[in-house]
Amino acid sequence: MKNVLLIISVSILSALLAVLVYRQFAPPQQVIIRETMPATFASDTKYLADRYPERQFISSSPTDFIAASNAATPAVVFIEARVSSNNFWGRESYGSSTGSGVIISHDGYIATNNHVIENSREITVTLNDKREYAADVLGTDPTTDLALLKIDANGLQHMDFGNSDSVLVGEWVLAVGSPFRLQSTVTAGIVSAKGRNINILQDQAGIESFIQTDAAVNPGNSGGALVNTNGELIGINTAIITYSGKYEGFSFAIPANLARKVLTDLREFGNVRRGWLGVEITPIDDALAKELELDRVAGVFLQNVVENSSADRGGLKPNDVLISVDGIETNSTPQFMELVGQFRPGDEIEIGYYRKGKYRTTRITLGERRTTVFTSAESDEAIGNATVLENLGFVIRDLTDEESRRLKSDGVFVEKIYRGSKIARTNMEENYVITEINGQKINSKDQLIRELKRASGMVVLKGFYEKYPGEYPYAFSID
């Protein structure tokens, strides 16, 4: 025992002696703990203020998905709609449609897709906390595939609208919905493109300017939320492009700025009040840009202006190139339609355009197509011409001079065909060049419209496709 105590005592004394010797001969050291610098945005750093423009959006890193998910999931609901239809024998049959929705106010207003609740008799909404409510349809808009529902509830967590115009390609986004009835599913991806037109809306006045993402979206996600990393609603998930029927990397959402305007109209009026310019536009491709001597392929080409319309009173003329709406560039017809579609009749917008190489702007007060008064026979004729094309379901234009030279033919170019229309049922495809109607040669769009207005019974159109040899006839009847 005495030996053990002796050993312990010697060890302690040795340790103390070692410390004293070290402090005597070793110089003192200063230990510095560096505090983390506070995070700032680039626009807040005075050293960069003169070099970089202020950022108009925030795109956080993927580690911030948790905060955005927590903000979004309580505001996204599961929707089940009982749908009725007539079967082959004319008897009424029943089924169900499921999808998602987004709570946009604390008192129970819910945004979803029109196709989720179309033809429904009863709608049940299940919240994230499993509470169920019966929902009423306050209004629908097939032209944007949006619908507004209302449930009898208060104090609900809802989503705030973000600015979809500020969203950039490459920005992280989340898709929140109920795919395959799996409630509150969150997937992540990036914005792949903006202003996409995928020809999915069957309404001929449909506005398609989708935000494309690669966030996983599957059946049941329709009507759900596309969310930025700040937890703001920047789109309503609507469609996918797929060969398998499941997600393949191409998802499409209605931009929040357009959705907010449509949903506000549905809430206030029960229908959508959309401003009308009174123009006919077409995209600008490389050939047209060269013909117009543009320095880049951008904007939309103004083919026609209805006399006495808002555009006419604002000074726009055929052959103008429209490049912006209220300062926002418009590089495609879907984007142009989306921007104008965000305004109501009576709103004033600024249009930027080129005419004969010179940049100009004009302020235009939008009208409404169904209520605008026309004062001349020419205006009535223009509206009648548009009606003929709408009833058949296609958009046509004259061939450009360059196209006529390249194709060595006169004719009329088919630019767009609406799904489910009379023209679509003939199996005609876009980019078809019409050269004859009922055996008569066609040289212009106006001539074709005149012949269509005169025609009755069976009509046969003949023409060709630039990339396919031979002549292709298409027939349909006019009652």
Image (tube, grey):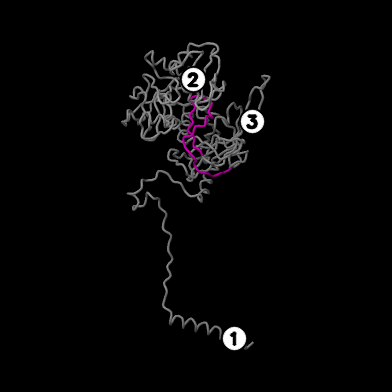
Q: Amino acid at mark 2?
A: Ile
| Segment colored magenta | 185-212
The residue mark sitting in front, 1 or 2, is: 2
Of 416 and 98, nearer the camera is 416
Q: Of label 3 and label 1, which has the lower sequence position?
A: 1
Residue type at tag 3: Ser
Q: Which quarter shows the N terminus?
A: bottom right
- Secondary structure of residue under mark 3: strand
The residue most toward the bottom is: 2
Which image quadrant: the C terminus?
top right
State left or right for residue 302 relative to residue 119.
Answer: left
What element does badge 1 sit on? helix
Q: Residue at the spot x=51%, y=49% of the render? A: 62
Residue 474, position as x, y percentages in the image: 55, 19
Name, please, the residue furthest toward the right: 89
Q: Residues within 10 Å of mark 2 (few under 14, many from 20)?
A: many
Q: Spatial distance from mark 2 to mark 3, Cα to Cα? A: 43 Å
Q: Pick whichever, 50 or 393, lies toward us.
A: 393
Residue that numbered label 2 is attached to: 434
Q: Earlier in the sequence, mark 1 or mark 2?
A: 1
Q: Which residue is mark 3?
A: 96
Residue found 43% across the figure and 38% down from its top: 165
Residue tagged by mark 1? Answer: 7
Q: Nearer the viewer, mark 2 or mark 3?
A: 2
